[in-house]
Image: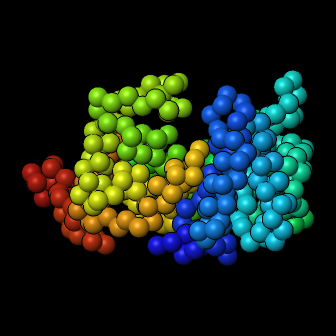
Amino acid sequence: MPLDHYVTLGRSGLRVSPFALGAMTFGEDPGGAGCSVEESEKILSTYLDLGGNFIDTANFYTNGHSEKILGDWFAAHPGRREHVVLASKFFFNLFPGDPNGGGAGRGSIIAQLDETLRRLRTDYLDLYWLHNWDRHTPIEETLRTLDDLVRAGKIRYIGFSNTPAWVTAQAQTMALLKGWTPLIALQVEYSLLARTVEGELAPLALDQGMALVPWSPLKNGFLSGKYRRGTEVADSVRTAYVGGPSEAEYTVIDAVAAVADELGTTSAAVSLAWLRAREGTVVPILGARRVDHLEDNLAGLEVTLSPEHLRMLDEVSAPTLSYPAPMHGALRAMLQFAGTTVDGETSTVYPPLLQSDVRY
């Protein structure tokens, strides 16, 4: 599947590439974790020339430089911006000392969007994400502001990122009841090494027809293939701060590498193919600091995992989910179906019922 075999993003009419291009690495400030303007432009050009159309950034990435790099490139290539899905995010405060410089209140959203549009040198965004939950602002204020911006033509669709499921469900229900713009996608951390989203957010997205747009689908490079037991990775930004993978993570990394070796591909491609095989619409965000990083990850479009590979990867990476998720598996079926098969799900009998048919 090439990049120009598009998918519909959630319950909307927005068509996007099966992989998004993440621009968090565009620009070298702060901290030197990103790449130069020249390399950023090469990565962007490569992605677009291969048929990609979904670009994701945020107001605070490299202190706003990411947005400016994108804006400058599109200004230098007239006619290209109208044919891409350009997404950015609001929430992070770029103005020390100003409590209203960030967050999700009406004034701050409008101000952040105006600055984002200025840096991107465009008059609208295709998709605007809430980057994080603002617990100090009523969710109805955030939603009404976003709906006003949609009606004004400054943004076209909205989504949430890094927000609890109960807040997201409340927001979606409120939007639908009031006739405001609903959420079409959730941007979440999701990978073979980070699956706790499957407890609440992923089922919510599936139920509401929202797409999942995973960030860090390779867990900051842990699933890229360069991490192997007994080897040291010198160019990893993550390991510079938090060290290498844990023993449990290496178990998953080893399993991914084994599948990659069997299929004659890379660990990154296998990890991305696993995400794309999840239920619902899943559009991973690819981050890259060099063009070859992007090209290597695009191999994930060419890999199809067998049911056996999927089963093995599911089992080795199975997450420990928070309550009440453990109550919703085999125990739920046992208590509810009493040894029958319902909708293809076969249950056993709750043990006390084996003792007697007496009902009191």
| Residue 309 image position (x, y, % from top left) | 26, 59
Whether residue 249 can be seen here:
yes
Q: Is residue 221 left or right of residue 74?
A: left
Front position in the image: 76 or 63: 76
The answer to whether 304 appears left or right of 146 in the picture is: left
User: Is residue 272 placed above or below 36 in the rendered structure?
Assistant: below
Query: Is 171 situated left or right of 220 in this image?
Result: right
The answer to whether residue 159 shows anywhere in this view is no
- When asked about the image quadrant of residue 148, the answer is bottom right
Query: Looking at the image, which is closer to me, 315 or 239?
Result: 239
- The residue most toward the front is 38
The quarter holding residue 94 reads top right
> In the image, residue 352 lies at what x, y percent?
15, 49
Q: How many marks?
A: 0
Indicate the position of residue 154 as horizontal and vertical percent values.
Answer: 86, 62
Query: Which residue: 15% across, 50% down?
Result: 351
Q: 28 or 190: nearer the eye?
A: 28
Left or right position of 288 against 331: right
**Render colour scheme:** rainbow
Residue sitting at 50 percent across and 33 percent down?
236
Q: Toward which corner of the image does residue 183 lie, by quadrant?
A: bottom right
**Looking at the image, which residue sits at the far left?**
355
Q: What residue is shown at x 43% (from left), y 61% (from top)?
A: 300
Q: Whole-percent x and y of residue 173?
A: 66, 60
Identified at 57% across, 47% down, the residue is 290
